[in-house]
Amino acid sequence: QVQLVESGGGLVQPGGSLRLSCLTSGSITSIDTMGWYRQKPGKQREMVAIDRGGPADYAASVEGRFTISRDNLKKTISLQMSRLRPEDTAVYFCHVHKWLNDYDYWGQGTQVTVSY
């Protein structure tokens, strides 16, 4: 069983920075995919950043502003967000895809609001 707990969300002004963290428990290996998604009001959940063990993939809208990082030993994954924009406002979800059982795990989400 894998559980994910996000932290670090909050209110920030445009141009500011936030760091999201996701603490995982359970069996997660270096080959499992870890990433961050977000869901804006009235919209579908969308990929923000994915780490498959090699170079990370980013959504075009966050490329150059967000950085994903993982620590396989501590079983954590983080998202450093810089130069935030109002359109980055969303609930951000941590995600793990385990290749062993081909199953997706999600955190409960953390709210990020970019506003004056």
Image (cartoon, rainbow, N blue to C red):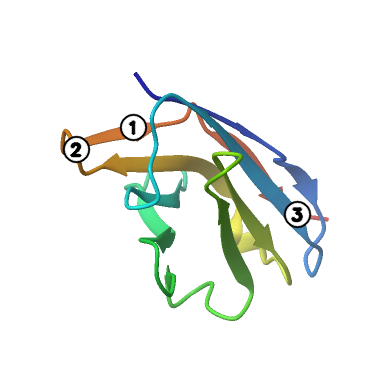
User: Which mark is first along the chain, 2 or 3?
Assistant: 3
Q: Residue at x 40, y 42 (%)?
A: 95
Q: Camera-side residue: 94 or 43?
A: 94
Residue 3 in which image quadrant: top left
Residue 103 in which image quadrant: top left
Q: Amino acid at mark 2?
A: Leu
Badge 1: residue crowd in 10 Å (few <14, some 14–19, many ≥20): some
Above or below, comparing residue 18 to residue 102 in the picture: below
Kindly give the residue lying farthest to the top in the view shown. Answer: 1
Badge 2: residue crowd in 10 Å (few <14, some 14–19, many ≥20): few
Q: Amino acid at mark 1?
A: Tyr
Q: Residue at x 40, y 70 (%)?
A: 54
Above or below, comparing residue 44 to residue 86 in the picture: above
Residue 87 in which image quadrant: bottom right
Rendered-image quadrant of the N terminus: top left
Q: Nearer the viewer, mark 3 or mark 2?
A: 2
- Residue 58 location in percent, x, y? 44, 71
User: Mark 3 — residue?
Assistant: 18
User: Which mark is first along the chain, 1 or 2?
Assistant: 2
Element type at mark 2: loop
Element type at mark 1: strand
Q: Please tell me the numbered disc located at residue 100.
A: 2
Q: Nearer the viewer, mark 2 or mark 1?
A: 2
Q: Amino acid at mark 3?
A: Leu
User: Mark 1 — residue?
Assistant: 105
- Residue 53 location in percent, x, y? 39, 62
Gap between marks 1 and 3, in whole Å?
23 Å
